[in-house]
Image (tube, grey):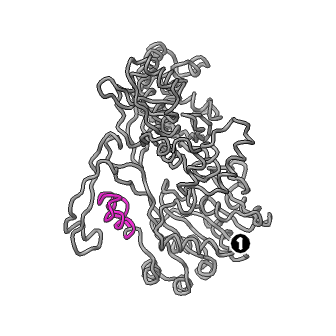
Amino acid sequence: MRNIRIGDYLVEKQLITQEQLENALAVQRESKGTKKFGEVIVELGYLSEVKFAQALAGKLHVPYVDLSNFDIDGEAVRKVPETLAKKYTIIAINIKGKRLTVATDDPYNFNILEDVKVMTGMDTDPVFATRTAINKAIGKFYSMQNVDSVLEGVQAFSDMNNAEDDEESKDRVESAPIVKLATTIVENSYRADATDIHIEPFKTYTRIRIRVNGDLVELMNVANVVHNALTTRLKLISGMNIAEKRVPQDGRFTQVVDGTTLDVRVSSLPTVNGEKIVIRILSTGQIALRKITDLGMTEYNYQLFESMIKCPHGVILVTGPTGSGKTTTLYAALGELAKPNVNVITVEDPVEKNIDGINQVQVNSKAGMTFAAALRSILRQDPDIVMIGEMRDSETADIGIRAAITGHLVLSTLHTNDAASTIVRLVDMGVAPYMVATSLIGVIAQRLVKVLCPACKKQRMSTDEENKLMKIDHSVPIYEACGCPACNNTGYKGRTAIHEIIHCNSTVSSIIAQGGTKEQIEDAAKAHGTRLLRDNVSELVQNGSTSIDELVRVTYAI
């Protein structure tokens, strides 16, 4: 079996077709040896990196390890020098006696195993892991070893500059400790799967927190004397005005971490103790790769959403709080709609991801390019589909609705608690009820809920009170969060979306036109099959995906 080519093996296992194999081999030949077969297969989208790694591990009869769910032994990591780990893209993960388990994406490379043996004096047992997972583990474990030295350098810096005035010199801002600190903060936040970084100044110290799975957790604290130099460094690389500290500013920069290019958004806000910095981390490509099937919708909601975006004209609204994945949902829809025969134009603030084949407009309020102004111009550009980042005011909402009535498909977002409230909000913004009823295709309300860690979640039976929350009349097995190394002792690992979709059929539209209440709209939608957010998360609790605590947290106010 080992002598068979990996491509033929994949075809034999029905993981790819013969046609896909031939196409991949052709692309590989065109690269003139610069790309491995596995890289080509993944780039073409025939298999995910994990699926290919698992298949290759099966062919080579080498155990496959998912490093994201593996409790890596820190002592094992320290056995292999960082330079060697990065040179060969390997990481030691376990020690048993005099044997060292090493994760690699090239388990039959004799030179790698021999060098590790010589360096450590231990026999090696190779296991297979993806290159991406290995790079991330290398970055996480070796960088954590270096954090202390970075903080020591920062402390020495603060001691030297403690007596200086508040004006930053170029030397201070670009000194090695400050540069390393700024880099380390972004690197460690990305490796912790954080979405945001908060750098908050107080009288005696600066607190740095990161948002993981929707919750803020402390990353580190640094001396307050370092704060001005750190914020100035971040503002400098983000293209902000470092001399202006009295007004909020926005900027962006890119940083490569573990082979991944990050798009980093920076926002500054003056506070009484100095400028607070909030950083949003976006991986270039993370949004573009999402498809509608990857949004976590139930089969019913997926079919409903598919039918809505196939409408030739009208308005589709996505609603939810900040950070609930609205933009991701809109981009997934645009990816489905963007065909060579249609003109798609977006107006966003900011443009979160550049997408090929779509015309994207950046809002610039200072220059007079507001949502409303951009939208008026867009309608003179012969669009078929228009995406408005947010309907912030009545003028934007009115233009968007009129665009839909005149034959355009309009996608946008609003900030409301649920789908029915969105419709009432449009009317409150001054859009006539009959125009809403005529133009609105449907509304998608969504939230993100934390997923229980599969390695440590604990089963128990639900109580009577919990049964009432889930709207069931009998006790069922449910799971609760515990905490383990795989989930950083949080009990949760990752998030998934829940959705509530109201499709504006004739009944719902009639109620809207008559100025119906939120309750009337919701009752009519439920009669036609709409599942509320609470119903969605209740299902996730019952199938063991999330906890009852998440049900209360996400839906208690709805």
Q: Residue furthest top?
A: 160
User: Which residue is painted at 45% across and 41% down in the image?
Assistant: 61
Main SS, magenta region, reads helix
The number of numbered badges drawn on the structure is 1
Residue 550 lies in quadrant:
bottom left
Q: Using the image as rendered, state which of residue 283 and residue 433 is in the foreground.
A: 283
Say if 271 sits above or below 85 in the image.
Answer: below
Q: What's the residue type where badge 1 is placed?
A: His
Q: Is residue 364 left or right of residue 299?
A: right
Residue 129 rendering spot, x and y as whole percentages: 47, 39
Q: Is residue 97 magenta?
A: no
Q: Is residue 260 above or below residue 499?
A: above
In the rendered image, residue 120, in percent from the top left (x then y), is placed at 40, 18
Foreground of the two, 298 or 199? 298
Q: Can I make out residue 34 in this image? A: yes
Task: Bin the neighbour count of mark 1 within 10 Å (Cα to Cα): few under 14, some 14-19, many 20 and up.
Answer: many
Q: Which residues are magenta?
A: 535-558
Q: Is residue 169 above or below residue 249?
A: above
Viewer-nearest residue: 48 or 82: 48
Task: Report if residue 202 is visible in the image.
Answer: no
Quadrant for the C terminus in the image: bottom left
Residue beneath the point at 52% across and 18% down: 165
At 31% from the left and 58% from the top, the residue drawn is 547
Residue 158 lies in quadrant? top left
Secondary structure type for disc 1:
loop
* Residue 394, x across and y down, in percent: 61, 67
Q: In the rendered image, which residue does mark 1 sit on? A: 408
> What residue is drawn where x is 28% and y is 68%?
469
Instruction: Residue 110 in the image: state x and y as whole percent.
Output: 51, 26
